Amino acid sequence: MKSTIYTRFVVIVAAGILVACSAASPDDKKAELTKLKQQQADIGKQILKLETEIAKANPDSVTVRAKEVNVTELAARKFDYFVQTQGSVDAEDNIQVSSKAMGVITAVFVKEGDAVSKGQTLAQIDNSVIQRNIEGMRSQLDLANTVFERQKNLWAQKIGTEVQYLQAKTNKESLEKQLESIQEQNSQTRITAPFSGTVDEVTAKIGQNIAPGMPAVRIVNTSNLKLKAKVSEAYVTEIKKGNKVVVSIPELKKEISATVTFVGKSIDPLSRTFPVEVKLPSEANLRPNMTGVIKVIFHTEPNAITVPVNVVQNINNEKVVFVYENDGKNAVARKKVVTVDGVYDNLAQVQGLKAGDKIISFGYQGLNDGQVIKTN
């Protein structure tokens, strides 16, 4: 019977070749070749099916060709459901320090790379006029204090009038407030560091006219970093503050474990995304604006059955995985219909298989249910 099948196959192929050769058009030859290849594949399947059926009915009548496969035994494992996106590193303390007053810069006390502390003077604006006003005001205040003390002593001895005493007191207090106001103006001529950090850029130059709002010095504190990213609105009910996160920084070739510290409440109408933030631990080589890949884990199955996603095949509108079984005489492939719960990291969590099942992880293409197999 096996010989008859092969004879028929040879006749069909030979006839096909004759027909193909007689065709005039190259396109017709290509179409005919495709048809013949399909017929060859179909016949091969029929041969394999008949061999398998004969082997089952009469094992000694035919030697069945076994297909070589690799198998993998399944075990329950932890399986993370996550969303992955790209973000960038940002510093909580990363600002351009500007002046509070208008004037000409007379001194710059820092350069790029300098470490500065909170309140340290970075640059000085010309304050010569204010200094002269302060000196004049102090002279007036000294006189006012002297007059006040004398009026106070005279009033204590009931000499003079209360009005004179009150006028001297009011004049002294008024000059004190004016001096305090001028000293406040003088303090605004100093550009100071709002927090401790490192000078990243100095744009202020001696002789430059500067006004409030103009950048003078950039200070960065890299001990307080975060990663900002955008996540699709499809996960708006899944992502929550406190979710575990794995951040991968390609430039550093390392992964950082963290948690979600902020989840935005609004959806961007253009990108249909919402913002998330992750506080990063202090790392010496982390820099603002570095790119990072963020993986937010929003659900974990502690004992999931997973298979490589590529072994799940669509056959007759069913999700199918082939497993290794032994029917007592031969190792055969058995078709198992499964349900896919989720696909993450090229793994699929499935229902319909159990721990201990041996799935066919290589050579599964083109297998038939009950086909004889052998493992490498």
Image (cartoon, rainbow, N blue to C red):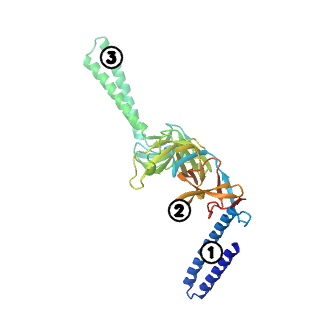
Q: Secondary structure at mark 1?
A: helix
Q: Residue at x 27, y 20 (%)?
A: 164
How many numbered marks are there? 3
x, y percentage for residue 15? 62, 83
Q: CA distance from mark 3 to mark 1?
A: 122 Å
Q: CA distance from mark 2 to mark 3?
A: 108 Å
In the foreground, 63 or 126: 63
- Of callouts 2 and 3, the N-terminal one: 3
Q: Amino acid at mark 3?
A: Lys
Q: Are marks 3 and 1 in contact (CB under 8 Å)?
A: no
Q: Residue at x 59, y 74 (%)?
A: 38
Residue 316 numbered mark, or none: 2
When the figure is inspected, residue 343 is found, relative to residue 8, above or below; the finding is: above
Residue 9 numbered mark, or none: none
Per the image, the residue denoted by label 1 is 40
- Image quadrant in which you'd find residue 326: bottom right
Q: Amino acid at mark 2?
A: Asn
Per the image, the residue denoted by label 3 is 152
Q: CA distance from mark 2 to mark 1?
A: 22 Å
When the figure is inspected, residue 188 is found, relative to residue 155, above or below; the finding is: below
- Of callouts 2 and 1, the N-terminal one: 1
Q: Residues within 10 Å of mark 1 (few under 14, many from 20)?
A: some
Q: Quadrant of the C terminus?
A: bottom right
Q: Secondary structure at mark 2?
A: loop
When the figure is inspected, residue 375 is found, relative to residue 175, above or below; the finding is: below
Q: Amino acid at mark 1?
A: Gln
Query: Can residue 262 be seen in the rendering of this structure?
Result: yes
Tell me the mark number nearer the camera, choosing from 2 and 3.
Answer: 2
Q: Residues within 10 Å of mark 2 (few under 14, many from 20)?
A: few
- In the displayed structure, does residue 373 sit left or right of residue 78? right
Tell me the mark number nearer the camera, choosing from 3 and 1.
Answer: 1
